[in-house]
């Protein structure tokens, strides 16, 4: 720790503005959206005040409003109508996220779209991997399923595909 702390660059807001390294603005933010089946649906996410599960039509309205506030990127999480052991709704051609991407692109071409490719939201057991019997299949098995998801999302022209599980499991695709 230095014995002298130079404060000349923090003296007033004008100097701080000149030398600051980070400026937070709407350009830096990514708004998360949890997309659900149906029409005209808006359900609160209890653990995240101000965040909702939205049907595609409501998500379009909400994203349009966020765009008006300067948000330029959204991250989509799919909440399918039905879940199974292998998360098949995640890699269906007409899956919930794939439909949402198509609708958003049709209404707002310049919105940056990102999607989550983790299986946990699509599996009946809630695990991001595939369970066979009493065992979780290995990383290679999970990667194959994520490749299916990426292939199904390719025609939708999504900008980024983000595996949310990577941070906690150290995986690389």
Image (spheres, grey):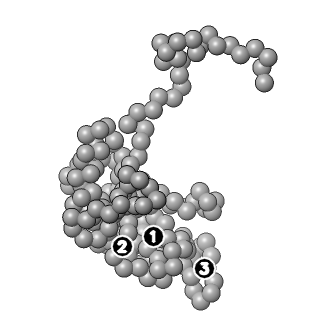
Q: Quadrant of the C terminus?
A: bottom right
Disc 1 from disc 2: Cα separation = 8 Å
| Camera-side residue of 20 and 145 | 20
Q: Which residue is drawn at 33% across and 76% down?
A: 81
> Which of the 4 quarters of the picture holds residue 139?
bottom right
Name above or below for residue 5 compared with residue 127.
above
Q: Which mark is residue 80?
A: 2
> Which of the 4 quarters of the picture holds residue 10?
top right
User: Contact, CB < 8 Å: mark 1 with mark 2?
Assistant: yes
From the viewer's perspective, is 66 left or right of 8?
A: left
Q: How packed is label 1: few (under 14 Cα within 10 Å), some, or many (20 or more)?
A: many
From the viewer's perspective, is 1 left or right of 8?
A: right
Q: Residue 46 carries which label?
A: none
**Circle 1 SS class:** loop
User: N-terminal of the two: label 3 or label 2?
Assistant: 2
Q: Quadrant of the N terminus?
A: top right
**Circle 3 SS class:** loop
Residue corresponding to mark 1: 121
Disc 3 from disc 2: Cα separation = 22 Å
Q: Residue at x 71, y 16 (%)?
A: 5
* Image position, residue 96 (x, y; %): 32, 69
Residue corresponding to mark 3: 137
User: N-terminal of the two: label 1 or label 2?
Assistant: 2
| Camera-side residue of 151 and 142 | 142
């Amino acid at each position: 720790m230095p014995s002298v702390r130079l404060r000349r660059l923090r003296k007033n807001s004008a100097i701080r503005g000149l030398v600051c390294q980070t400026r937070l603005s709407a350009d830096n933010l990514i708004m998360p959206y949890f997309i659900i089946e149906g029409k005209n649906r808006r359900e609160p996410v209890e653990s995240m005040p101000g965040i909702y599960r939205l049907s595609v039509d409501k998500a379009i309205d909400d994203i349009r409003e966020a765009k008006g506030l300067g948000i330029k990127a959204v991250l989509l999480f799919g909440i399918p109508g039905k879940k199974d052991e292998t998360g098949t709704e995640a890699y269906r051609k007409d899956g919930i996220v794939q439909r949402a991407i198509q609708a958003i692109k049709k209404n707002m071409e310049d919105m940056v779209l990102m999607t989550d490719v983790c299986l946990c939201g699509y599996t009946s057991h809630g695990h991001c991997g595939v369970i066979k019997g009493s065992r979780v299949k290995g990383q290679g098995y999970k990667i194959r399923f994520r490749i299916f998801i990426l292939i199904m999302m390719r025609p939708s022209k999504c900008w980024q595909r983000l595996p949310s599980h990577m941070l906690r499991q150290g995986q690389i695709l």
